[in-house]
Each structure stands twice: as structure tokens, then as C-alpha cells.
Image: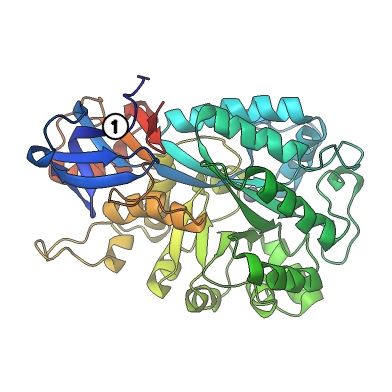
Amino acid sequence: MTSSPSLPYWICPELAWIDGRMHADKAIALSGDGLIEAVVTRAEVPAGQVVEDLPGAALLPGFVNAHSHAFQRVFRGQTEFLRTGAEHEDFWSWRQQMYGAAGRLDPQTTYDIARRLYAEMRAAGWTSVGEFHYVHHGADGSALSPATAMADAVIQAAVDVGLRINLLAVLYHTGGIGEPARPDQRRFISGSLWAFTSLVEALLARWGSHRLVTVGLAPHSVRAVPVDWLEALAQWNAQHHLPVHMHLCEQTAEVEASHRLLGAGPMEVVRRAGLLGPGFVAVHATHLEADDPARLANAGAMVCACPTTEANLGDGFLPASALIEAGVELCVGSDSHIVVNPFEELRLIENNERLQRRRRNVLAKFVEPAADEPDKRRVAPFLLDVGARGGARSLGLDAGEIKAGQAADLVAVSLRDAALEGVPMDFLAEALIFSADTRCVLDTWVAGVRG
Ligand SMILES: [Zn+2]
């Protein structure tokens, strides 16, 4: 990592990803308030300005990690074996091990784990994170002082690494639909909706003016939040307009229980509660029902895919073709942080379709060709957009594109990297999506600050 000149200044990469393609000879002005001020040709930079050339580098909008549980980084590698006497492992047995890790956290360990993870994220090319944060209380379920201590620790870790964060405060009340919370869930539990909105308001008061910090809502799932609470939360948010992220249709057992106990599938339950709208993000959506893509599209809602975690947990496949055909926008997250690699999350959206259908370039069918190459449909530009602009939209951020007025959140990749060297400029996006590893990442900028 290299320190940058003080703002404002210009950066001139060898290539820049602008409007869905690579351009040579561009100059990007980073303003003192952390925004992209202008994008011009290199020759148009006014004389006397501070200019930093980036030879051998391609500049892209930074990736946005829209779904993270930071603390789950702490048991990486430690659930990847069968224990004698427990030969059937699935999401639910993994969840039991995860609760064990959650039970051992305090604000300091939470900070340490998150800081290590966020440094890993930034080195991998992510410039923002949506932290789906649900460990709010002490190990016995009692309130900490201040009540935001655990969330504060996570936010402080992001700020100290220079990663932009939306703290998605999780609302969690029941252990299953209509069931009381279990003892190992009590660290997550809000006793009343008022207690939860008070926590959110405290976070907004403490962090709302920080340049790198925003706050969102995360009703955990239909398993964890009663329907009348979902309705009340939708009404509360009509005044606040915060992004709403929710685990939805991750497991068939959740979909079946929703039908049995609530009389409709999870997506329809959320729609009836008034939560489905342009600020809503369904996380996972691996077991959608036939009408769900249309429900999401009609509401302008998004889906967050977490393909490496979904593979690791055996969740199932994102129905990417159905969602994209319906017009649902996507974003990605590294969720449980088995790996922290934006290229891999994005390539799996396409590769998983190929594996299931035994065909190639499956999602390209839904992408319009550019005017100057009407015979080519390219999925890679679409996926780069999912990773940056899609993620930014999901967190309510003005970021994700290299253009004036957007946050100066950027990633530079090395054109000399072994995976990218020799690839023609016109196919660099494809090489990034299908072949790159995070070692190609040279540097990131967040709010114009390199680090
Ligand atoms: Zn999750």
C-alpha cells in the first residue's frame, strides 16, 4: 500500500472501467470531500494540478460486500470435517457451531475479529461492507452499556481500516415461527420493537454524521421476527427510509414452515407486511417460489447472492436466470467469509448456471449488446456492475461507478498480474470475472483515501 497525496488530486490509470467498458487515457479527479469530481481525458487535466499516474493498472469502482457476518470469520476452517456420531451435517448443524462462536464474543474480541476481516476485505478489492449485525447483548442476554457497544466495535473496526460500512442492525425476536428464543439466541434478541428502534436511533445519533458510516435495518428472517413486528417495522421505516435487508428463502425448511404456520411463503409474508419495496434486499433467495421473482421485480426490490457461503453451507443455487429475466437487480456478499473474494462471488453466479444447465454463457442471454458490437452479448460487464453499483444501491450509497458525483471508492488491479497479463483490453472484464484472483488487487481508495 502507498500513501496518497492530500486531496484534491488526479489519478491517471493505464485503463479505467467507465460506462461498462475499459478506456485508456482517462484522468479522474478526487475531491477533498471524498467524491469523484470529474472524469476527463489525460490531456484535459488543467496545468499545475497534482497528478498521480498508475502505469500497469486498471481502475474500477470498488466492490461492495453487501452481506457480512464479521464474527463468523473467527471459526474459518473449523467446521470443515465430520465429527464421529454426527455424520449428517447441514446448515442447521453448522448454525449450532456458529452459535458457540457467537456466545464467546465481547466488544474487544468483536473489534479484533472485524478489524482483521475488514483489512482482508479491503486488500481483496471491497471498499464497502453491509454488516448484518445481530450479536447485540451480553452472553446472558443483558443489555451492554452502552447498548450499542457491540455494533460500535464493528463500526470502529471498519472506520479504522478505512472501509465504508452500513451497519445493518438485526431485529431478532423468536427462535422459530411462533417459538420462544432459545438460550443460545438470547444475545440476538430484542424484547420489544421499541427496544430495537431505540438501538437504531442510538446508532444513527452516534454515527450518522460519519463519512464512512450509514445504518440500515435487518429483520433477520421470517423465523426470527413475528409478522405484526414486520408490519410495525415497515411503518416505522416509512419515516426513516433506511435500507432493509432480510434473509429470505435460504432453506426449504423455512419456506415449508412459513406456509404451514403463516399461510404463505416468506416472500408473500414480507410483501403483505409492507416491507417489499425499492429499498428491500432479499438475502440468499435460494429457494424462491415460482411467483417470487415477479414479486421482487414489481416492488423494485433486490436480491443479494452469497454463492461461496451458499456452496459451503449446502444451501442450494441462486435462481439467477429467473431473477434476471424478471428484471430483479442483484448484489453479492461474502457472508460467512469462507473466502473473501469478489471475483469468485461474481463468477459463481454464472458458473453455477452453467453447471446446472450444461451450457455456456447462460446469463448473457439477458444482457443487451452494446451498439457498436451488436453480435456480442457479454455477461462480465453485467457481473462487474452487480459487484459494484448493485451493491452500492443495496446499501443506499452513491457509489459503484466511475463518474462525477459518485463516492471516490475505487480499486486498482495489476495488468502485470499472472492471471491478467497478455489479455487484450477488450476482454479484460471477462478475464477479471472468470480468471482473476485477489492477488491482482494493487490498491483501494475509499472516500478518495488510498490505503
Ligand atoms: Zn447471513
Q: State the SS at label 1.
A: strand
**Res. 285 in view:** no
Question: From this viewpoint, which residue is outermost toward the top?
Answer: 2
**Res. 366 in view:** yes
Q: Quadrant of the C terminus?
A: top left
Q: Residue at x 21, y 61 (%)?
A: 377
Vertical side of 195 occupied by 230: above or below? below
Q: Which quadrant of the structure image shows residue 15?
A: top left
Q: In this orientation, which residue lies closer to the viewer: 147 or 400?
A: 147
Identity, as a three-letter code, of the amino acid under mark 1 = Val
Q: Position of residue 388 (x, y in %)?
A: 39, 49
Q: Position of residue 426 (x, y in %)?
A: 14, 46
Q: Quadrant of the N terminus?
A: top left
How many numbered marks have been drawn onto this rendered protein structure? Answer: 1
Q: Which residue is mark 1?
A: 413
Q: Residue at x 41, y 43 (%)?
A: 63
Q: In this orientation, which residue lies closer to the viewer: 48 or 146?
A: 48
